[in-house]
Amino acid sequence: MSDRIFRRWPTAWPVQPVDSERWSTQHPTYRDADPKVIAAALERSQNRPSGNWYVFGASRDVRNDRPFGATVAGEELVAWRDQQQRLVVGPGACPHLGAPLAQARVDCGALVCRWHGLRVSGAGGPGWTALPCHDDGVLVWVRLDHIGDEPPSEAPVIGARPPSNRAISAVATVTGVCEPADIIANRLDPWHGSWFHPYSFTHLEVLESPAAAHEPADSAERFVVAVTFRVGGRLGVPVHAEFVSPEPRTLTMRIIDGEGAGSVVETHATPLGTGPDGQPRTAVIEAVIADSPRPGFRAARHAGAALRPLMIHAATRLWRDDLAYAERRYQMRTRHRTG
């Protein structure tokens, strides 16, 4: 029955039938996934300026009625919004006796420490100074010049996104035992997609890739793939997508042709510091920003609150697998370094 339906399936529909294919019989990609190409793309990515900016959470998680605590590169931070809804970020320990300001109370746009009542605000406080921060509407950033050790920039490096007034966004966060470069290296290997994530991707072909180390770098410095996103059963959405790394801790996937053109998935790798086992921890903070000109997408926007958990679940499922990849990479290279 389904074959008869699929033979008559309109080609103009965004969701298309997917040929049934055994996982083991798909085209092997190990010959195409040249380690030198991946390593060269990663090296160039790590040499790009970041301006010392770090993503530490989702914009919607920072509110004006309670503080939000975070850690970046071992630095304890606290964030909240003042009475004008402006983002405020600063050290997370009270300068008096070190109380956690993430447990403070928000009062008239300021934080009041619960231990002894010390008050801090965007204008500062006794022994406390706010840090440069940025809210891009989806993610919140902090600039840590003493950690990044680069020339600072006024704002973080952010690629093109769909207009916020018509997009649906969701942010997922997972943590792994690795360093940020291991997360970016994972994303600079698109060839693993349909092998490692067959529940999400199929018919993946890399159409364009950056230069290897011995070749001149293409100014575009991108991977372009043709891929079908599975939406259930034998149905999928075929698109072309590009992967670019605009700064050392960010990898952006943008749909450049097909349904949802302009939609992006931004993967941000934020160092958290060292865990109890002496190993580094890195947070993967991934923002999915979806858009479509189709009339039905307008209704989907109104259901954004219901769709957001589903988007977060899908991103988290992918990163459960990809963290194993990144953590394995970290183990192998540090074993080689210390062996």
Image (cartoon, rainbow, N blue to C red):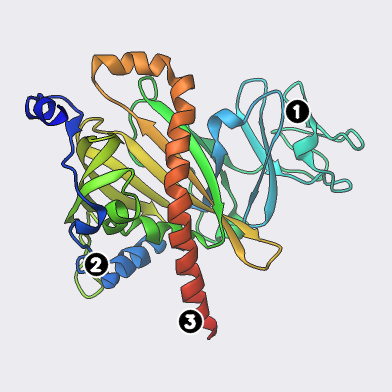
Position in image of residue 329 (x %, y %):
45, 68
Between tags 3 and 2, which lies in front?
A: 2
Name the kind of residue labelled 1 in the image: Ala
Q: Position of residue 242 (x, y in %)?
A: 25, 47
Nearer to the camera, 78 or 200: 200
Work out which quarter of the rendered image holds the N terminus and state it: top left
> Which residue is disc 3 drawn over?
336
Q: What crowding class fits label 1: few (fewer than 14 Cα within 10 Å), some (14-19), or many (20 or more)? A: many
Residue type beneath disc 3: His
Alpha carbons under labels 2 and 1: distance apart: 55 Å
Q: Position of residue 113 (x, y in %)?
A: 84, 35
Numbered tag placed on residue 30 in the rendering: 2
- Confirm or deny contact between disc 3 and disc 2 (CB under 8 A): no
Q: Amino acid at mark 2?
A: Tyr
Horizontal arrangement in the rendering, residue 320 relative to residue 80 (left or right): left
Above or below 26: residue 33: below
Q: Secondary structure at mark 1?
A: strand
